[in-house]
Image (spheres, rainbow, N blue to C red):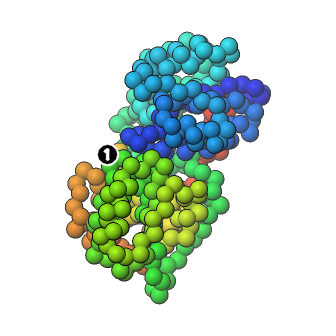
Amino acid sequence: MTEGKSVYIRLDANHAKGMGHLYRMLTLANVLISYRLLITFIIKCNAITENLLKDNMYKYLSFPESMSEEDIIVSSISNHKSLPVLWVFDVLSTEANWIKLIKKKNIKVVCFDDEKGGLHEADLVINSIVHSWGGYKKESINVPLLEGTAYAILQPSVFNLRKERIISDEEFLKVGITMGGSDTYGTTLVILKSVLDILDNYKFHVFTGPHFLHQNDLDAIMDSVHIDISVKHAVPDLHLELDHMDVVICGGGITMYEACAMGLPVLPFANEDHEEKNIDFFLSVNACLPIGSINNIDYDEIGSKVNEYLANHEVLNQTARYALNCVTDGTLKCSESILSLL
């Protein structure tokens, strides 16, 4: 019986961290509340994140950016009359002492994408992306571990739009560019600068997220090219927008999973070190066509790869088929495993 029991979800979402942690935990939370669990998000102060939580009608506790994790844990637990039965960490690798502090109160702990403390102290670890870049040996782990793309938590709308997509040779390709909810390093600008020579050959659609802070630079590019490029900011439903695209250029995180699950051919660009390894995994199963990394920006090379891939419809169609088979909906599997702890 889960009715009335409380669950705390600890994450950060901001310009530096990105928005992926928040989006996937909102998806998980929506499943958990269907079991009458009471959800409270634990975050560091951020106006955009707080507004999104309010829009989704979730309770939250926010703490100063400078506050230590230990103090956040102590404050979150001590300020409430009833303790949660479960604490979910989605902050990537945790420290063992954080988990011990929580478990002293007989609270179960679940960690997502953890390479450190969670692997030794948590009640459950779910690594849907770490399997491709994890620095641990599975045989040394002494807690339950769910590992692999089968446990990816993706928004339900992704699977409503899931289908086999075929690009015909006669099509004038529509190319979506979406580099995350924050695009911390301004890779939207990198991609656009790289494809300046082929803007006339395709219809590019740019989607920026709620934490995008490079608008002036983007406007400068738009003013300089004098070509009709669609730019939309913080669209209500990104997946519905991507459904109208033929190809998606995105980062190597959750958006890559989502576009693949929709059956779209994906040209990923690594925004972070771990995304390079994540992209390598998708490449190993022929599910993506990488175009570069933030660690080695070469505009000519990126543009050349994009042009090469977009010109080859057969390769795009083949990649889309592999992508469709690579990612399935792991939300139910994750939620069932979490509920089994309660």
Question: SS at mark 1?
Answer: helix
* Residue at image coords 35%, 56%: 216
Asked whether the viewer can see residue 308, the reply is no
Question: Left of 101 or right of it: where is 56?
Answer: right
Pick the residue in front: 72 or 304. Answer: 72
Q: Which residue is labeled 1 in the image? A: 273
The percent position of residue 316, horizontal first and vertical second, equals 43, 73
Q: The C terminus is located in which quarter?
A: top right
Amino acid type assigned to the residue bearing label 1 in the image: Asp
Is 170 or 240 nearer to us in this picture?
240
> Is 30 displayed left or right of 45 in the figure?
right
Q: In this view, does 115 lie above or below 286?
A: above
Q: Which residue is drawn at 64% across and 21% down?
A: 84
**What residue is drawn where x is 51% and y is 41%?**
48
Q: In this view, does 42 lie above or below 129?
A: above
Image vertical order of residue 32 relative to residue 245, above or below: above
How many discs mark residues in the rendered view? 1
